[in-house]
Image: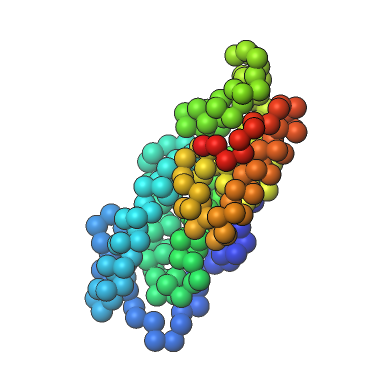
Amino acid sequence: MQVDPSVTAARGSAPAAAPGDVPPGDAPAGCPGRPGQLPARRLALTFDAFDAHHHTLWLRYAHTQVGGRADAESVVDATCARLLEHWPHVLTRESVAQYAWAVLKEEVAQWLEERGREPALVGTAAFRAAIRKLLRAGARDRFTVLQGEIGLYAAISRLPERQYDAIVLRHVLRVPDETVAEYLGVELATVRSQVRHARRRLARELDLPETGNETEE
């Protein structure tokens, strides 16, 4: 899986600030590293509300990728710090949720690259449960399901980025389609199309029958 290149700022580099940006104030509890100055109290409250809405899902996604709670918290803290440092700029983006999702994925990719590791998705209980559900309809016995799981791990990793994200968010993390669309910056119909194409591609690669209901959870 490749990281979406739409967010080009590397770790530690700042996006261009718009004229008149207000410097950030003190960091809220649980979010690292806001530089000192207090004039942006309103911006801080805006970030706090945004973070509170998305933080749990960010943690769940990071956990599927890095494999541990503490490591996931570290990745999300780094994401939080980057967003917070440039929050006035972030607010100028067409979709703040989509931008934050791209930053989170960059931080995950950076964390994995630094340690020479692959995403830990295949080892998570949520992934195994979701994949068994996807495969069970076409499997005649438990051995067939196990064989399918092994092949599916590799097949999912080869999906195009948007299809990978849609499968992980929708089927592993069980996120509503509306939220998936918000994170990917696409229309609701596009999310369902991405999921449909991903499932067809996986079925072809694993020589499994497709389920009749493409929109099932």
Instruction: Specify the color scheme.
Output: rainbow
Residue that appears at 36% across and 47% down:
56
- Say left or right for 203 vs 178: right
Residue that appears at 41% across and 56% down:
78
Is residue 18 among what the camera can see?
Answer: yes
How many marks do you count on the picture? 0
| Residue 3, above or below 45 | above
Percent x, y of residue 168: 54, 42
Q: Residue furthest bottom?
A: 19
Percent x, y of residue 50: 35, 61
Residue that appears at 31% across and 68% down:
46
Residue that appears at 31% across and 55% down:
52
Q: Quadrant of residue 199?
A: top right
| Residue 34, above or below 109 | below
- Say left or right for 212 vs 38: right
Is residue 33 among what the camera can see?
Answer: no
Percent x, y of residue 71: 42, 42
Q: Residue furthest front?
A: 212
| Residue 187, above or below 73 | below
Between residue 68 and residue 13, name the one nearer to us.
Answer: 68
Percent x, y of residue 184: 55, 56
Between residue 210 and residue 173, name the one nearer to us.
Answer: 210
